[in-house]
Amino acid sequence: METQDIVRILEQTGALQNGHFQLTSGLHSPQYFQCALLLQHPHYLQQVCREIVEAYHEEKDTIHVVIAPAIGGIVVAQEVGRQLNVRSIFAEREGGKMAFRRGFTLEPHENVLIVEDVMTTGETVQELVELAEASDAFVIGVGCIVDRSGGKHKLDVPVFSVYSTKVVTYKPENCPLCQQKKPLIKPGSREI
Ligand SMILES: [Zn+2]
């Protein structure tokens, strides 16, 4: 998928919004991602997940399980798992730490593909790498829909992103959009 195609889909579905946003961090940004708005459409979900599956084409037959962090990654894991015909599980926060609940487990020496919808710093994905390695599973790589670090994450496993971009942020006092008196939008609960 060409960059212009994924950008078009992100914009058409409202998953990528342009304007003047106050992020949860308090910083202002001309862009805001809500990937769920893309993933709600089954055909787009299939399309972007196929990109991840194709990126790991060579390892395809060796992947035993797809794992994701809740909540955003769950639908991505389900669809990538469906396309690979392997099981799909997710980790969620328990006492501040990522953990497998609901009886989900990884067997030692299983090969794992980690997926996520939007990766910001890579810290959550890194927690999943450590969680998998704690089970003696092997992490083949990471596939995400959007990498907002623009490739600046510090993960030492292979990472594929359907779309990679460095999100511009401003301190409110230095924000050119504030100076232009553009209305400030404060989107929901998304951690940014
Ligand atoms: Zn501003």
Image (cartoon, rainbow, N blue to C red):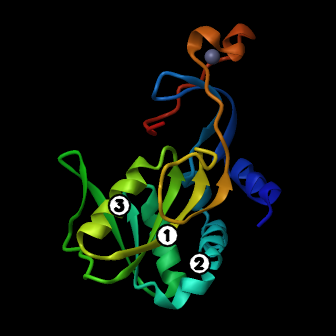
Task: Find disc 1 in the rendering and name its residue.
Answer: 141
Q: Give the SS element for disc 2.
A: loop
Decide which of tag 3 and tag 1 comes sooner along the chain. Answer: 3
Q: Is mark 3 within 8 Å of ligand 1?
A: no
Can you tell which mark lies on residue 128? 3
Decide which of tag 2 and tag 3 comes sooner along the chain. Answer: 2
Decide which of tag 1 and tag 2 comes sooner along the chain. Answer: 2
**Whole-number angstrom distance, CA of label 2 to CA of label 3:** 18 Å
Please say if 101 is above or below 178. below
Q: Quarter of the image holding residue 69?
A: bottom left
Amino acid under disc 2 = Tyr
Image coordinates of residue 191 in percent, x first then y, are 44, 38
Q: Residue at x 71, y 8 (%)?
A: 179
Q: Residue at x 65, y 14 (%)?
A: 175
Residue density around tag 1, few if under 14, some if 14–19, many if 20 or more, within 10 Å: some
Residue density around tag 3, few if under 14, some if 14–19, many if 20 or more, within 10 Å: many
Q: Residue at x 63, y 27 (%)?
A: 29
Image coordinates of residue 71 in percent, x first then y, are 39, 55
Task: Find disc 2 in the rendering and name its residue.
Answer: 56
Q: Quarter of the image holding residue 91?
A: bottom left
Q: Look at the numbered discs 2 and 3 and tell me whether their residues touch, using CB distance below 8 Å.
A: no
Amino acid under disc 1 = Gly
Query: Which residue of the protein is positioned furthest toward the bottom in this rendering?
Result: 61
**Whole-number angstrom distance, CA of label 1 to CA of label 2:** 8 Å
Please say if 29 is above or below 174. below
